Image: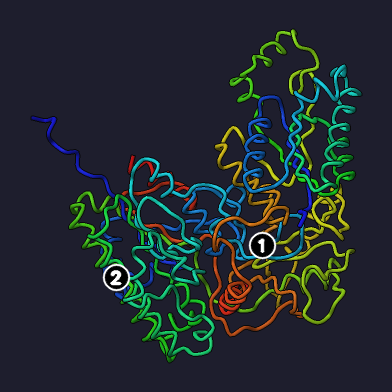
Amino acid sequence: MMTQGFTLWFTGLSGSGKTTLSREMEGVLLERGMKVELLDGDVVRTNLSKGLGFSKEDRDTNILRIGFVCNLLTRNGVVAIAAAISPYEEIRQKNRQLIGRYVEVYCKCSLDVLEERDVKGLYKKARLGEVKNFTGVSDPYEEPSNPEIIVETGKETVEQSVARILRTLELMGHIPVSGNGAEYSPEEEEEIKKRLKALGYI
Amino acid sequence: MLGFLRKPKKRLCVIGLDGVPYSLLRVLTEDGTMPAMAELCAHGHLRSMKVTLPEISAVSWTSFMTGTGPGTHGIFGFIDLKPGSKETRFPSFRDVQVPTLWDRLGQKSKKSVVINQPSTYPARPIQGVLVSGFVALDLRKAVFPARLLPDLKRMNYETDIDTQRARADQDYLVQSLHSTLEGRRALVDLIWDKEEWDYFQVVITGTDRVQHYLWNAIADTAHPFHQAVRQYYRAVDRFIAEIVERYWKKAGKEKGLTSLFLLSDHGFTGIKREFNLNAWLRQEGYQRLEQATEPRLQDLSPDSRAFALDPNRIYFNRKDRFQDACVETEEIGTITQEISEKLLALLCKGEPVVREVFRCADIYSGPCVAHGPDLIVLTYSGYDAKGNLLKNDVFTETDLQGMHTWDDAFFWSAEPVDGDLTITDLAARFERFLS
């Protein structure tokens, strides 16, 4: 039986953990026997979006192209994972509408923490003006208005973030529930309902 | 020679009394019902404590054990919505999004024994022992490690009383309160010396049950169950005395005193009326049901602007959150103000009903805020907010006698704790103590 695909879209500033988490999720979902494709923004810019720059127009085109591919994969039963800064709400919403089975993960991390980490040294270069149109420093990032999942990557571990993403995907019915006896059976739910009713909680 | 001296082991012991209000504990310690507790009060500090909202055990105990609020731990009630949907579900321990106090202690190689902790079902591995409390159903899934299961089965350990039967049969209630208390005592007996631990915690939940069903009997000397309820509290007091004595033997009286803590997860008061939020929302034109019999939240008309979940959570039917929704993001401010003003002006027989309406964006923080409600309605004592979709009258009578309160939980410690105290403050305090 072919399972339904969906798109897991990671958005957030540079260095906020999108690539790390998307790779972790790719591994976990592959282990669970799902068909998975990862589209990393940095990689996409070397092929699918080669030649595009960092103007608003080029950024929008890049994100819409990734969204287009994610939609093709999703409707063919694949889990498409996208990891791209995707700074503009309007474009993210367009992708959401196009894809339908779309789950947005906002990798939230303060600029202070990111500048302190600055693994690639890009924030320093951006502050010095050596890198232009750098999101968060010299280009805007519009926070998602209602992402399905927020992971606070400056405050939690990778394991915690992955667990939250997996749990939400389970609750949304996109992936099967893992673990023996971890969920309530219909009979158990009925019993819980009775107990809660008796205490006036529902 | 100093190098061979072993540093004395640091220990900490916590006794939880589910739903026992600070104000009631003051009465019971002063009138002689709880002499052991009174003795502790003479040597320490009893104070009131606020809990997180909604003020129910599922949320409060999770806030206690994680040291975070619902916006971070992700538990907003006994019942919740599936993401992006109006379909309801029962969150489990698996839905708690952050590590518990004993998870963190375990990372530091500290062992914990946790008995009858509500909202920890199904039990998961910890460094030590975990026996889940309410809503634990199947003992096999309520005990870690599983090697303890045969012992618990042999002693006929009950995770809770039969709440349905207890509501209808008060004699059964009283008898089962004592039998479950005996069960906790037997389990403490079994584990106390057998297991190695740095952190020990036991929670008594019968106190919450007796107040739901027999709150009026506590103060009313003419009530047929007055003596029975007082006797139960005396039994709880003896249980406390035994734990304290055992602990002082293990840790030494001086150290044992300063590393002993007692708390409740919310307060209680009597009920005058149930206040049915969904009926009120319909009366005010914010909600319409498309199906009259056995309606579910999914049966709300798409033009419904708000709905409530137990006990006091209001959700706007937001287009950016739900399908079949009508509230635009830009309307949130207006609808919040409108509903808040109307609720604050609401009277029942000339009495105000709503004490405060909180915007969740103001009271919660963390990655789970977006999954929570939009508003929390805090009522005055006596008006028990409910999210029952089936009730048509805004105010109804009930056979339940007690309702939860937010700012009348208690905390006892040997050392005084100054300033505001919230239940989320305790986990970090205990962790520091054991570090």
The residue under label 2 is: B239
SS category of the residue bearing label 2: helix
Does residue B116 appear left or right of residue B259 in this picture?
Answer: right
Q: Between disc 1 and disc 2, whose residue precedes?
A: 1
Instruction: Return the x and y of residue B33 as percentages of the image width and height.
Output: 31, 76
Residue found at x 74% / y 29%: A40
Is A135 in front, or is B25? Answer: A135
The answer to whether residue B22 of the structure is visible from this angle is no
The answer to whether residue B98 of the structure is visible from this angle is yes
SS category of the residue bearing label 1: strand
Q: Which mark is residue A32?
A: none
Number of the front mark, 1 or 2: 1
Q: Residue furthest left?
A: B1
Does B35 appear above or below A100? below
- Please identify the quarter of the rendering in which residue B345 is found: bottom right
| Label 2, residues with CA under 10 Å away: few <14, some 14-19, many ≥20 | some
Mark pair 1, 2: CA separation: 35 Å
Residue found at x 34% / y 63%: B147
The residue under label 1 is: B80
Residue found at x 65% / y 46%: A165
Q: How is the image coloured?
A: rainbow
Instruction: Return the x and y of residue A185 as percentages of the image width and height.
Output: 60, 70
